[in-house]
Image (cartoon, rainbow, N blue to C red):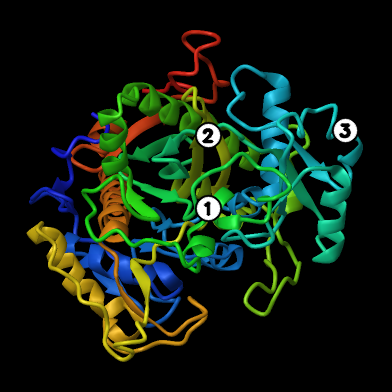
């Protein structure tokens, strides 16, 4: 059950795949994996996979990529049944404006089924409709730039004029304006949200798995209902780790079992804490499964061109120069040279979910490239400027082993003073037990499932989704046996799933 410590794929709090002599010994190309490379190296070693990192041309069963250009390149150069870690079209569909358009279209077709997405308008074109759509119903709205990440450019605004001024000041070309949740569920008076990790294994058939472990991001300053005096207090209203870690009130949590302390916490520990506060955890889990199932189905429909007004062809950067690292793609969307991309592309997504005080879930956004970094920054203390902070060993031996292994992934290996842009003050980088416990489960379980699927296709075997994720930290939430539209067992219920949800 949710928050249970006796979890498949774990020894204690450490991801530890079951011993399986039949597990295929595969290979993964991490040349383009960027910040995910470190975790993938640890996962590959534990699964007995070979890591190929010399070149993007190195042949491998799995190619871990990030950008649309890398995705296109690997799809065209791979052998049959080799997998690519990005679904074409997902990168741009998860940007703030396209995702809002997708959710608004889905909500217009079925308002009850998609009532988990906050009321939203697109700016500048939707400015005139904001009041009618109820975006300012709670007195405050949240403004997010289309291409913003890590909380960059997000503002709380009380009027449309203020939103327009903000857009002009930082030269936002387009943005979303979303109703602010003014009565959120709180943890000891602090606002929080949940990062839920979702594996879309394939589009055809649509197979979606939800990781039972995740992160909870908590504000650094106690929550107060927004008004003119506190709208600018980002660390009171916005949960983004990047914003909060620079606040003087930010607290590190050294004990991942503690769901009541720190700016970053383990999902399972927070669920246990909420349960002790008599919060209905079964309902929360049901809400999460429903939001993930409906949200993932909507994204799949968007990528497959099934949603009017959401055109994956137009969003694909064919011949569109965006930067030196993203010079544009050479083929049109869905080109025949990609092969069976709808089966062979998978994607790990980050669903950001917030609950209100009535335990209704809201899907705030979906991150197409959730961070897999496992380090955290500690400010250098003035009294011991060049001494890294002491870290007590983890009581969980398996997790402590991962902590030791991940030291090599940290800048300065945890002992050298750093002045990078991760923090405005001199600091040290050291492994974060909470990140390690969650992200090793996310990536390890993902690779285990992908590896099983590769072997099954190679051997001409078809197994159930439940068998695919057996003894991993994942649950199957959407399994399509065809191209049916989403259906619900009980109309009006927020529990359950989409399609053949399980």
Report whether 247 appears left or right of 2.
Answer: right
On the question of residue 479 being in view, the answer is no
> Gap between marks 1 and 2, in whole Å?
45 Å
Labelled disc at residue 28: none
Q: Which element is circle 1 on?
A: loop
Relative image position of residue 126 (x, y in whole percent): 86, 40
Q: Earlier in the sequence, mark 3 or mark 2?
A: 3
Q: Counting other residues with Cα less than 10 Å from the Cα at mark 2, is it few (<14), some (14-19), or many (20 or more)?
A: many
Which of the two residues, 201 or 275, is positioned nearer the viewer here?
Answer: 275
Q: Position of residue 288 (x, y in %)?
A: 43, 31
- What SS does tag 3 mark? helix
- Residue drawn at x 68%, y 49% as measured from the top left: 96
- Mark 1 and mark 3 in contact? Answer it, CB < 8 Å: no
- Nearer the viewer's eye, disc 3 or disc 2? 2
Disc 3 target residue: 129
Residue 397 on image: x %, y %: 8, 60
* Element at label 2: loop
Residue name at image x 44 percent, y 76 percent:
57
Q: Considering only vertical position in the picture, is 401 above or below 287? A: below
How many discs appear?
Answer: 3
**Residue 134 horizontal side relative to residue 441, left or right:** right
Which residue is label 1 attached to? 339
Vertical placement of residue 210 versus 243, above or below: above
Above/below status of 62 relative to 203: below
- Residue beneath the point at 50% across and 56% down: 86
Residue for point 49% across, 27% down: 357
Name the residue furthest right: 128
Say whether disc 1 or disc 3 marks the residue closer to the N-terminus.
3
**N-term mark: 1 or 2:** 2
Q: Which residue is mark 2?
A: 184
Apparent side of residue 421 relative to residue 393 in the rendered image (left or right): right
């Amino acid at each position: 059950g949710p928050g249970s410590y006796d979890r498949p794929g774990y020894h204690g709090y450490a991801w530890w795949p079951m011993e399986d002599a039949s597990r295929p010994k595969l290979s993964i190309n991490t040349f383009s994996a960027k910040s995910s490379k470190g975790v993938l190296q640890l996962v590959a070693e534990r699964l007995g996979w070979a890591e190929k990192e010399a070149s993007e041309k190195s042949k491998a069963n799995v190619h871990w990529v990030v950008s649309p250009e890398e995705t296109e390149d690997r799809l065209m150069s791979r052998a049959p049944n080799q997998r690519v870690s990005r679904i074409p079209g997902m990168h741009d569909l998860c940007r703030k404006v396209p995702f809002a358009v997708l959710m608004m279209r889905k909500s217009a077709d079925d308002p009850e089924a998609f009532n988990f997405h906050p009321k939203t308008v697109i700016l500048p074109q939707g400015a005139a409709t904001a009041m009618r759509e109820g975006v300012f119903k709670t007195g405050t709205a949240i403004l997010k730039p289309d291409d913003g990440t890590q909380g960059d450019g997000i503002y709380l605004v009380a009027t449309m004029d203020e939103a327009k001024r903000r857009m002009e000041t930082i030269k936002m070309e387009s943005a979303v304006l979303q109703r602010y949740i003014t009565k959120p569920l709180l943890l000891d008076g602090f606002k929080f949200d949940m990062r839920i990790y979702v594996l879309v294994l394939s589009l055809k058939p649509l197979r979606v798995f939800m990781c039972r472990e995740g992160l909870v991001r908590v504000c650094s300053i106690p929550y107060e209902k927004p008004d003119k005096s506190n709208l600018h207090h980002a660390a009171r209203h916005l949960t983004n780790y990047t914003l909060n870690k620079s606040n003087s009130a930010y607290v590190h949590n050294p004990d991942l079992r503690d769901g009541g302390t720190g700016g970053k916490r383990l999902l399972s520990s927070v669920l246990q804490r909420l349960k002790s506060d008599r919060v209905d955890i079964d309902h929360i889990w049901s809400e999460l499964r429903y939001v993930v199932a409906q949200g993932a189905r909507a994204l799949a429909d968007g990528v497959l061109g099934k949603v009017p007004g959401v055109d994956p062809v137009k969003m694909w950067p064919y011949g569109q120069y965006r930067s030196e690292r993203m010079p544009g793609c050479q083929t049109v969307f869905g080109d025949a040279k990609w092969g069976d991309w709808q089966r062979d592309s998978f994607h790990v997504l980050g669903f950001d979910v917030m609950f209100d005080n009535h335990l209704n879930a809201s899907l705030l956004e979906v991150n197409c490239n959730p961070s897999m970094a496992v380090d955290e920054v500690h400010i250098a203390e003035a009294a011991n400027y060049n001494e890294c902070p002491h870290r007590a060993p983890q009581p969980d031996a398996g997790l402590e082993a991962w902590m030791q292994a991940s030291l090599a992934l940290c800048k300065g290996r945890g002992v050298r003073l750093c002045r990078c842009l991760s923090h405005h003050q001199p600091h040290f980088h050291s492994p974060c037990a909470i990140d390690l416990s969650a992200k090793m489960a996310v990536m390890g379980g993902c690779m285990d499932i992908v590896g099983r699927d590769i072997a099954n296709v190679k051997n001409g075997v078809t197994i159930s989704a439940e068998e695919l994720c057996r003894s991993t930290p994942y649950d199957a939430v959407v399994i399509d046996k065809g191209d049916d539209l989403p259906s619900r067992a009980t109309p009006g219920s927020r529990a359950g799933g989409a399609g053949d949800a399980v």
